[in-house]
Amino acid sequence: MAFVSLLLIFSLHAAPSLFGTVQHAVSPGLSALGIGPHTASNQACAQCAGQGADAFVISPAIDDKARIYSANNKQTVELSIVTPERALELFNKLASNPEIPFGYAKDGCFARAHKMALLLDEEKIVSGKAFVQGRFYAQTMAGPAFWRYHVAPMVLVDNGGVLEPLILDPSMFPRPVSYNEWKGGMKKSPLSMFLAEYFTNRFSYDLPDKDAQYEDYNPAQISAMEADLVKYRSMIK
């Protein structure tokens, strides 16, 4: 998996008039996750909409990891590279964990994401966090929700030699999804408004941490996470 070519994510968005209609292809493994090929202009593509040409860049892979640079908060985040099959296995383990209250999605995404990052650590998976900020009227697995921001853990998946961010968010989807499908799930309502996106390492807990350069988990935030999970579990009807 070493030396995967440098990928400028969605650089075609910078020149839609030049490239016109583009086939957005995926590997068979990603097709198994429900991420299918689609043909559209980059400007018109609903699945890929909203991603600026320079929002993030993925470095060449070294062994089973690569780094993703998040331009909006100037963070470089190391992430594990997994196969689609491994991603689905990890997702199912997270989704079935009784400590994480996926049945209450109106609040607490920061606590759910932090707990999932810790569980991924146990699987020897280095995850990161994907934050989006705006006004989102989302349809979750537990019903409708309104968010000012949302966060979920992410890894990288190898799509036929191209590395792509993959989101693990059982509160929104029954499977791992591409980063853009994840964002698109929050932007389906005409009332939703997208403002900004950030990637951080797994140690960031909440949106105010998006610019932090943490090198480890904060014990106080771990304690807050545990208390938050207890609170949100109690809200599941």
Image (cartoon, rainbow, N blue to C red):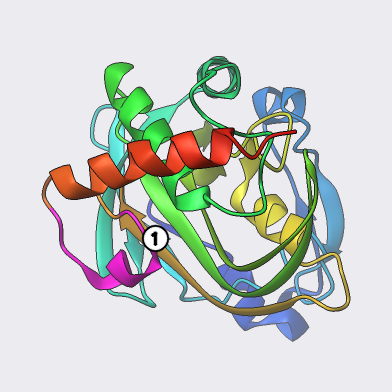
**Residue under circle 1?**
199
Q: Residue at x 32, y 63 (%)?
A: 69
Residue 100: where, in percent of width, then height? 52, 29
Give the answer, above or below, for where 43 lies relative to 5.
below
Q: Which amino acid does label 1 sit on?
A: Phe
- In screen coordinates, is 172 left or right of 116? right
Residue 106: give x, y in percent of width and height: 67, 53
Which of 202/62 is in front?
202
Res. 84 image quadrant: top right
Q: Which one is in front, 197 or 119?
A: 119
Q: Is residue 161 something one can see in this rendering? A: no
Can residue 115 be seen by looking at this rendering? yes
Q: What element carries label 1?
A: strand
In percent of width and height, residue 231 lies at 50, 41
Q: Identify the residue at image location x=55%, y=14%.
A: 89
Q: Relative to 189, does residue 177 appear above or below in the rendering?
A: above
Please name the residue shown 50% across and 20% down the image. 90
Q: Residue sitting at 44 percent across and 51 percent down? A: 110
Q: Does the magenta stretch include residue 208?
A: yes
Q: Quadrant of the C terminus?
A: top right
Tell me: 159 left or right of 199.
right
Name the outermost residue toward the left.
215
Q: Residues within 10 Å of mark 1 (few under 14, many from 20)?
A: many
Quadrant of the drawing holding the N terminus: top left
The image shows a total of numbered marks equal to 1
Magenta part of the chain: 205-214
The magenta stretch spans residue 143: no
> Where residue 179 sits in the image (x, y, percent)?
60, 52
Task: Give whichever of 34, 140 is nearer the camera.
Answer: 140
